[in-house]
């Protein structure tokens, strides 16, 4: 496992919510975080059908474009009764042509569960795969999961994406009802980042 000894890290995302989470999680380690939008980077085409493959595409494209080490995240929600969908296509379900509409995506998720008459609890997992890549081509992979269930109607205005319909195991609140601090203690991204920090930063 390679240690990170740089002072600047590019987070290969255009998602402001993800960038804010990463910045908060990395702040104690004195690493300056810069986002892909700040560097005017295009979003690479994600051609893989798995989280690791798509995270690798994003990380290495960012490294090649900037010369900086880069951290990419591919994440999504997998619903058991939908055979793991939307999974790697989580963001695609929110695409409208004029940006992403996660309200629409959440409605589609629940509608498909209703059409299948899926029994309760409607189990699901948030998945996060991180790829930390260096300019010499080396990378490290870290995976985090957060099990729980989906609910309807959406609750809470915090977080982003599918957070308002996801209740983590052991909680009666959706991620959308939790403060950023509470979510960052348990989230799939926090689990993956925790593994990365222990292996590469601690």
Image (tube, helix red, strand yellow):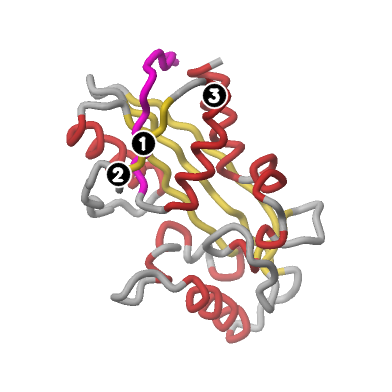
Return the x and y of residue 54 as percentages of the image width and height.
Answer: 33, 47
Residue 171 relative to residue 97: left or right: right
Give yes or no for contact between labels 1 and 2 (Cβ–Cβ under 8 Å). Answer: yes
Give yes or no for contact between labels 3 and 2 (Cβ–Cβ under 8 Å). Answer: no
Q: Earlier in the sequence, mark 3 or mark 1?
A: 1
In the rendered view, would you say 98 is above or below 28? below
Residue lying at the far left in this picture: please name it: 65
Q: Which mark is residue 38?
A: 2
Location of the C terminus (image quadrant):
top right
Residue lying at the far bottom in this picture: please name it: 115
Rate crowding at label 1 as few (under 14), some (14 to 19) or many (20 or more) other CA atoms within 10 Å. Answer: some
Secondary structure at numbered mark 3: helix
Return the x and y of residue 9 as percentages of the image width and height.
Answer: 37, 28
Give yes or no for contact between labels 3 and 1 (Cβ–Cβ under 8 Å). Answer: no
Would you name the residue on which mark 3 appears?
197
- The range drawn in magenta is 1-13
Q: Nearer the viewer, mark 3 or mark 1?
A: 1
Q: Which mark is residue 126?
A: none
Q: Main secondary structure of the magenta part?
A: loop
Rate crowding at label 2 as few (under 14), some (14 to 19) or many (20 or more) other CA atoms within 10 Å. Answer: few
Closer to the camera in the image, 101 or 181? 181
Closer to the camera in the image, 17 or 131? 17
Return the x and y of residue 128 as percentages of the image width and height.
Answer: 51, 45
Q: Is residue 11 magenta?
A: yes
Residue at position x 40%, y 62% in the image: 89
Q: Which mark is residue 34?
A: 1
Q: Earlier in the sequence, mark 3 or mark 2?
A: 2
Q: What is the number of callouts on the image?
A: 3
Residue 121 relative to residue 126: left or right: right
């Amino acid at each position: 496992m390679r240690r990170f000894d740089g002072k600047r890290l590019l987070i290969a995302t255009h998602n402001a919510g993800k960038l804010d989470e990463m910045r908060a999680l990395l702040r104690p380690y004195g690493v300056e975080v810069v986002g892909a939008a700040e560097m005017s980077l295009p979003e690479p085409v994600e051609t893989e059908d798995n989280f690791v493959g798509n995270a690798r595409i994003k990380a290495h494209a960012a490294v090649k474009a900037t010369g900086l080490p880069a951290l990419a995240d591919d994440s999504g929600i997998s619903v058991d009764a939908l055979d793991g969908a939307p999974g790697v296509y989580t963001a695609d379900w929110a695409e409208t042509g004029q940006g992403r509409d996660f309200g629409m995506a959440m409605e589609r998720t629940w509608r498909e569960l209703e059409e299948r008459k899926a029994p309760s609890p409607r189990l699901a997992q948030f998945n996060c795969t991180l790829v930390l890549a260096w300019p010499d081509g080396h990378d490290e992979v870290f995976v985090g999961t957060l099990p729980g269930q989906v609910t309807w109607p959406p609750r809470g205005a915090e977080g982003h994406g599918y957070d308002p319909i996801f209740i983590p195991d052991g909680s009666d609140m959706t991620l959308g009802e939790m403060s950023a601090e509470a979510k960052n203690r348990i989230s799939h991204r926090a689990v993956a980042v925790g593994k990365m920090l222990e292996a590469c930063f601690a």
